Image: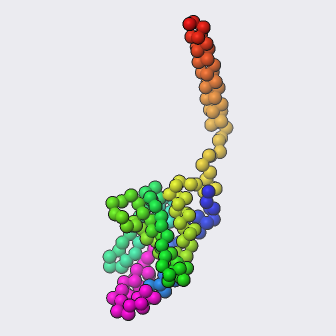
Amino acid sequence: MTDPALDRQIQAIERPDKALWTYYVLSCLLFPPLLFIMGPYLYFRYHTMRYKFTDDGISMSWGILFRREVIVNYARIQDIHLRSNLVERWLGLARILVQTASGSSSAEVCIEGIKEFEALRDFLYSRMRGVKDHAHPAVAAVDADTAAGYGELVAALRETTTELRAVREALANRK
C-alpha cells in the first residue's frame, strides 16, 4: 500500500528540477563545440519539459518547433529502470526509463530531472501493479442492503448443500 500524501506529492511534479539544467550545461562543457550545437536544443528542452502523473497514466511533453507528447497508461507499463551516471548522481538526479510492450527495445518514456526518483519509481510500480492507496481500500465497506443480499446468498448456498448431501446419501443407500 502506498501513502496518499506521497502520492499527492508525486502527482504534483510538473517540471524537472533545476539540477537538470546544470547537468545539461556540464555535459555540453565536456566537449565545447557541442555547446553551440546542443546548447539551444537542451535549453528549450529543459524549459518546455512538462510531466503529469494522473490516476490513469503518465504524460510527458517537450519542444517548441516540434512539440512532442507521450502518454503512457499505467496498465501498459512492463518495466521501470533507474539509470544515472556519475554527474547525475553527484547532482542527485536519475533517469527513470519506463518500458511498455511496444515493438521498440528502447524506453517509451524517459523521465529525467527528478530528485525524488526512488519515490517516483515506487509510485509507478504500485500503479503498474494495481495497488490502491489507503483512502480507497480494495475491499469496500458493505452497506446494509448488500449485507442482507449476502445473508440470503449464504442461506441459499447452505440449503443447496444440505439438499446435495441428502441426494448423495439417497444414492448411496440405493446401491
In the rendered view, how is the structure colored?
rainbow
The image quadrant that residue 106 belongs to is bottom left
Residue 67 locus on image (x, y percent): 35, 74
Q: Quadrant of the C terminus?
A: top right
Give me the residue at 61% from left, 22% from top: 161
- In this image, 32 relative to 169: left or right? left
Who is closer to the viewer here, 124 or 89?
89
Whether residue 59 appears in this view of the structure is: no
Work out which quarter of the rendered image holds the N terminus and state it: bottom right
Query: Is 163 contained in the magenta span?
Result: no
Stretch of the chain drawn in magenta: 25-51
Look at the image and tell me whether residue 6 can be seen. yes
Magenta stretch secondary structure, dominant: helix
Along the line of sight, the residue nearer the viewer: 51 or 108: 108
In magenta stretch: residue 41: yes
Q: Residue at x 40, y 75 (%)?
A: 62
For residue 163, which quarter of the picture?
A: top right
Q: Is residue 32 above or below residue 46?
A: below
User: Looking at the image, which residue sits at the far top?
Assistant: 174
Residue at (41%, 85%) from the top-left corner? Answer: 43
